[in-house]
Image (cartoon, rainbow, N blue to C red):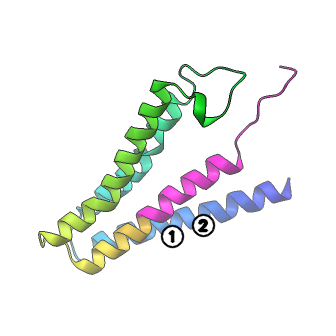
């Protein structure tokens, strides 16, 4: 029980630092476009979560027997994650945002998405054989 509580506290701290970096990248240079990065990393796990159980066989849990819907969910998730990293770089290249805001936005977005992945991995419920 105490290990789960420590995990939640650590993950919430890392998530808060990630959002702080994204908000600071917007507020310090008075340009709120890097806030779109937070949105992309928050919605990134949704396609994978939605398509995770589509067409899966309950006896096979390997990647070799995955269905097309599961692969499509992974593809859309990867597309959104790449967009989250590429958007600040494109905005910096077109001189819309400052390069330091780009770095802070990418670091904060990586922390947010990493926290979401770590939370889902740490608290994944395994199916019981007796259910």
The quarter holding residue 95 reads bottom left
Report how many numbered discs are placed on residues in the image: 2
Regarding residue 28, the answer to whether it shows in the image is no
Residue beneath the point at 57% across and 52% down: 117
- Left or right of 102, for residue 2: right
Tell whether position 73 is magenta.
Answer: no
Residue beneath the point at 72% across and 22% down: 59
Dot 1 alpha-carbon crowd within 10 angstroms: few under 14, some 14 to 19, many 20 or more:
some
Q: Tell me where residue 97 appears, x and y as whole percent.
A: 19, 72
Residue beneath the point at 83% across and 28% down: 128
Residue 83's tag is none
Q: Main secondary structure of the magenta part?
A: helix
In the rendered view, would you say 17 is above or below 4? below
The quadrant of the picture occupied by the C terminus is top right
- Left or right of 50, for residue 61: right
Please report the bounds of the magenta region as a residue range.
109-131
In the rendered view, would you say 109 is above or below 24? above
Residue beneath the point at 34% across and 61% down: 85
In the rendered view, would you say 29 is above or below 16? below
Q: Tell me where residue 94 appears, x and y as whole percent.
A: 11, 69
Looking at this view, is 11 or 69 the one in front?
Answer: 69
Distance between the alpha carbons at the discs numbered 1 and 2: 6 Å
Q: Tell me where residue 65 appears, x and y as whole percent.
A: 59, 27
Residue labelled with disc 1:
17
Marks 1 & 2, CB-CB < 8 Å contact = yes
Residue 13's tag is 2
């Amino acid at each position: 029980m105490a290990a789960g509580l420590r995990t939640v506290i650590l993950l919430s701290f890392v998530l808060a630092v990630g959002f702080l970096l994204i908000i600071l990248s917007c507020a310090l240079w008075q340009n709120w476009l890097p806030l779109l990065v937070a949105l992309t990393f928050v919605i990134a796990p949704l396609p994978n979560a939605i398509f995770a159980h589509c067409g899966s066989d309950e006896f096979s849990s390997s990647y070799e027997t995955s269905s097309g819907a599961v692969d499509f969910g992974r593809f859309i998730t990867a597309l959104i994650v790449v967009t989250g990293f590429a958007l600040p770089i494109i905005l910096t290249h077109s001189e819309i945002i400052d390069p330091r805001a780009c770095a802070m936005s990418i670091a904060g977005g990586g922390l947010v998405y990493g926290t979401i992945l770590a939370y889902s991995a740490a608290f994944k419920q395994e199916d019981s054989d007796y259910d």
